[in-house]
Image (cartoon, coloured by chain):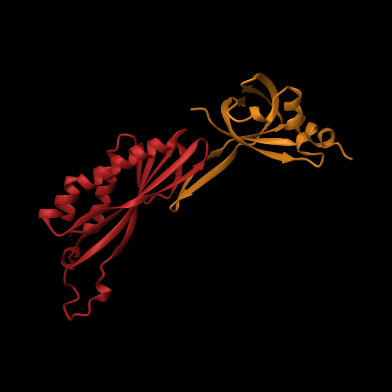
Amino acid sequence: MIDVRENILARLVAIVATMPSIKNVYRNNVDLTEDQLPAAAVLDGDEETGDHTDHSQHPSNRPTLATMTPEIIIFKLAPQVGPDISTLRRELIKLVLYDTELNEQIIGTGRFGNGTIRYLGCQTDLGWERSMFGALKANFQFKYPLKPDDLL
Amino acid sequence: MIDYSAVLFDPVYAELGVSAMLTTTSGVFEITVIDDTRAKMQTSNNVDVRSVGPGAFARIPELTSKGIDRADYISSVLSFNGRMWVVRSYDLRGSPNGEDVGEVRFLLRSDD
């Protein structure tokens, strides 16, 4: 069985775990405490195929292209949280876009296949807790082949 | 007119207040505060991050009598209950006798 979607999400957790300034990485954990920070959360993203516009008579189990938009959120408490979040953003974008396993083996981008990885942008969130709280949500789009045969 | 300092604030501070050291650009002052550190949660993209929102109440008449002006509040250092904080902002709580004889709630942050 090859589940590209799951492989991407698992790889994202592994990639974020290599960031030197991140203490903890979680998958789908939506309840953190300050002692766990700086932390990152990889949240499973929506998946779309665009096949709702496909009116052809091809078999229903034909391979198609799927697009997933998972969320990677970084959290930090620090007196000057802005520069820290900027540093983490730079590290994260570069790690995801340049990851060899993700590009060559899982998704197949460029000369390895017809998949793509795109960085769509980010949103920030600020507030006060014990210290200044900063969060940055990075949005990536992953396009990859979905082959129903592989799912069995 | 009821003297709210005499019948309300002073008795409450006598029971709940703790000794604190307030360090401003004008000097170091011993004052009485009520610890108002509360649970605080920040939600970002459906992820809750739990921490505390440190805070403390003080009586403005006590501050004024010790020469601590409103302009001294922000960036002063307040230590009490074994912890040291920096005043990042404050709320004037007012009083039926006027804001100058009411309370101030210091909004605090970690000093590191």
Image x and y of residue B54, in percent: 58, 35
Q: Relative to residue A42, is residue B11 depicted above or below?
A: above
Q: Quadrant of the C terminus of chain A?
A: bottom left
Task: Tell me what residue is drawn at x 35 percent, y 46 percent.
Answer: A26
Could you tell me how many numbered marks the image carries? 0
Quadrant occupied by the N terminus of chain A: bottom left
The chain that appears red in the image is A
Please give left or right for residue A8 compared with residue A43 in the image.
left
Q: Quadrant of residue A75?
A: top left
Nearest the camera: A85 or A10? A85
- Check the image and report above or below for A63 versus B50: below
Task: Pick the residue in front: B53 or A36.
Answer: B53
- Relative placement, left or right, of B64 versus A150 is right
Pick out the residue farthest to the right. B1
User: What residue is shown at x 23% (from left), y 54% (from top)?
Assistant: A117
The picture places residue A120, in percent across and down from the top left corner, at 30, 54
Residue, far top = B27
- For the point 28% across and 59% down, the residue is A68
Q: Point out residue A22 in the picture as x, y percentages from the top left corner.
A: 34, 37
Which lettered chain is shown in orange?
B
Q: Tell me where residue A66 sits by quadrant.
A: bottom left
Q: Is residue A5 left or right of residue B101?
A: left
Q: Quadrant of the rendered structure where residue A39 is?
A: top left
**B49 over A7 or under it: above or below:** above
Q: Position of residue A146 (x, y in %)?
A: 20, 64
Farthest residue, direction front: B71
